Each structure stands twice: as structure tokens, then as C-alpha cells.
Image (cartoon, rainbow, N blue to C red):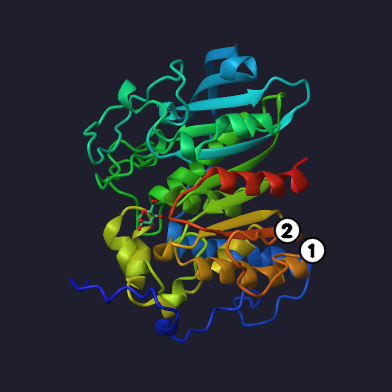
Amino acid sequence: MDNQLPPVIEDETLVPAYTLPDVLRDESGAAVTSAAQWQTQRAYLRRLFETHVYGTMPPAGQVTATIDEMSDQALEGRAVRQQVSLEIAPGHHVRLLVYRPRTEQPVPVFLGLNFRGNHTIQPDPHIQLTTSWVAARPGVVEYRATDATRGSQTSRWPVSQIVDRGYAVATIYAGDISPDKNDQFRDSVHTRFYRPGQTAPAATEWGTLAAWAWGLSRALDYLITDPALGPVAVVGHSRMGKAALWAGATDERFALTISSNSGCGGAALFRRCFGETIAAINRLAPYWFCQNFHQYDQREADLPVDQHMLLALIAPRPLYIASATEDLWADPRGEFLSAVHASPVYDLLGSVGLPAHDFPAPDQPVTGGLIGYHLRTGPHDITAYDWDCYMDFADHHLK
Ligand code: GCU
């Protein structure tokens, strides 16, 4: 790979001319015109994403759950808190944290991975600290979770607001599944699936994003067994938004998929080369995608898929994409256009995808179809405003 990456494009007039692969053209070039044909096409597109982008995932095994802790006095008595140890692969445990309202009826759930440990989502001293590696960050050099970071991510996880609107929230620290570092997957769930003598995933086997997505599906295996819980939405911000989209695309049990500012490798179209590009993301985190994906550095036009096809894999289930005005690195317009170009698949399946073709003004959510979209004013983040929009959408589709 060249050492020099091309200058970053953050000006619409500099976006190169491009042609998107047609989501409704099959392997032989024929038009896909029926719901039955779409099923074949969907399987074909999924294989392309596995082979060229995210890598293949191992099959699900038995997930064993142990309730470590439970209280019906969480959030000043308004919620039930549950901490569950899940053995997602032989010898590999992750901790699932759930808050749910104290109601009799099953409630829909938002399931998402967190960046820094379950204890960061809420200043609740009962949340167990992860024993997995956590990244250092400016001012806080910690490679193990400590009490110092309790509640540090509460603005991204408005647990009270979610519970008060009648939803449960469930989360796992992504690093419990696969640490976000370039260490040859040493402490990752990947190692549990190595064949004898194998020391790294093969070129078309899963990277870290696919491991996170796979972990979300293992959490779902457990959540659907809890009678207190209803349909499960998968949600994620940024790199966890990429993982949420791949989880929603590959696991049809997710009733709703939500991506916040997922950008390159998430909702944004690769071929626009706006903001983060394939070469840039592969340099930043060479372990996120499968090794095969690296051959597309600065060759986006040769990739057999683009991200409207990823979104289309979710059809006809509901999908919500959120961007932010200042988050040019994630290409807000490219995220919107991806939703526009996924919509013909929703049409084919007899529903409406995104009911708009024009990029909306900030803070004017596009709703009324099975794909929702908004462009929040502000920086790269997931905020209380975003959550309110997700819950407005979920009120329509999950309740
Ligand atoms: C970096 C990376 C993005 C990613 C983001 C995040 O900015 O380039 O692809 O989405 O980190 O996860 O916060």
C-alpha cells in the first residue's frame, strides 16, 4: 500500500463520478423482479459482503446464561437491572447488562455494544467492572476498567429516558467479545474457532466488526428467552453502528436496526469517497474487516457491492439511519443516499423504504416509511435527541 493516502474529500463538488452496482441485478445480470427472486439475490449479496468486506462468521453454538445479579430497585425503583454472564463460545464469557421498566407486559429492547465497559453507561455502583482490556484515552491511562470511569458514557446511553418510555436497554462491552486493538485477535472470540494450527482468520473469515455482530446475535439468543422482553432492536454508534448494521443484515430476528453516524463500512456509500475511505479505514483498523477487503484500498469501483446493498439486506424490516451535520468524516449525505438506493428493495417487497429523495434539513426526521433518517445538528455522537427519534420510530414499528 502507498504510504500517502489521497487528500480527504469533504467538499461535495469533489466527489468523483461513480456508478453504483444495481441491487436488483443478479449474478447473471438479470433483473430481480419478485419477492421470491429477492431471497436468492439476498443470499448472493450476503455472500459478497462476507467474501469481500466483513468476512464469514462461525455458526451459532449453545449460549449458556448465568444470572449474576438482579435487582428490582434500579433507577430509584423504576427499573429492574439484570447482569448476565453469557458463555457465547466454549470458554468465552461476556457480561450482558439489562435495564427494563417494572411492568407486567413484555417490553421491546434496544441492544447495543458499548465502547468502554458496561459500568460507563450509568453511574450505578452495582454494575460489574469488565475484566477485559479497555483502551487508554487522553487523561485516563487505564487498560483495566476502574471506578474512575463509572458513568462516563451516560450522555450516549440515556437509560432513564429509555426506560421511562417503556423500553428495555441491553448492552455488552464490545471488548468482552473482541478487543478493539490490533493484536492478532489474541484475546478475541476468534481464537475459539481456530482450526488446529490456525493462528489468524483466513482472508475471507471474520474481522472484528463481524465478531461484534456475531456477539450481538449471541446476546439475542439469550434475550429472546426472557419472557419479560419483547422484540429486539439492534443499535450502535460509529464503529458499533457498523457492527449493528452487519448484525441486522445477517440476523433476521432483529426487529429493527439503528445506525448512528456509522459512516465508512456502515451506512455510507464507499464509492463517493467522501470523508473516510476504504484505504483510510483499513489503515486505521486493519483488523475490522476481513483481509480480503484490503485489496479495495483506493479501488472502490472494483468492489462488487456498495452499502445500499447492505441496507437492502435488512428489508423489509424497519431500519433507521442517523447522521450529524458536523460529522463529515462519516459522510452524512452518503448515508442518506444509501438509504435512498436501498429503497427499491422495500418497494419490491410491497412496502415503502425511505419516503424522500431530497436530503432533509437538519433536525427534520424523515419518517413514514420502513426506513427512517435524520441529520442531527452537531458533531459525531449519539445523543438524547437521537434516542428520542429512535424511540418515536420504534413506537410505530415495535409496539
Ligand atoms: C474513527 C473511524 C470511524 C469510526 C469512528 C468511531 O473515526 O475512522 O470509522 O466510525 O472512529 O467508531 O468512533
Element under disc 2: loop
Name the quadrant of the C terminus: top right
> Are there few (<14), some (14-19), or many (20+) residues within 10 Å of tag 1?
some
Q: Amino acid under label 2?
A: Leu
Image coordinates for residue 106, horizontal then vertical, percent: 75, 28
Up-down relation of residue 328 to residue 233 (above or below): below
Of callouts 1 and 2, the N-terminal one: 1
Q: Amino acid under label 1?
A: Ser
Up-down relation of residue 47 to residue 137 (above or below): below
Instruction: Name the residue: 40% across, 78% down.
Output: 11
Instruction: Name the residue: 67% across, 65% down.
Output: 40
Element under disc 1: loop
Whether residue 379 can be seen here: yes
Nearer to us in this view, 7 or 298: 7
Quadrant position of residue 14: bottom left
The residue indicated by pointer 2 is: 370
The answer to whether the residue bearing label 2 lies less than 8 angstroms from the nearest atom of ligand 1 is no
In the image, farthest residue toward the right = 350
The residue indicated by pointer 1 is: 351
Nearer to us in this view, 4 or 45: 4
Do callouts 1 and 2 mark residues in contact (Cβ within 8 Å)?
yes
The answer to whether the residue bearing label 1 lies less than 8 angstroms from the nearest atom of ligand 1 is no
Q: How many marks?
A: 2
Name the quadrant of the N terminus: bottom left
| Distance CA(mark 1)–CA(mark 2) | 7 Å
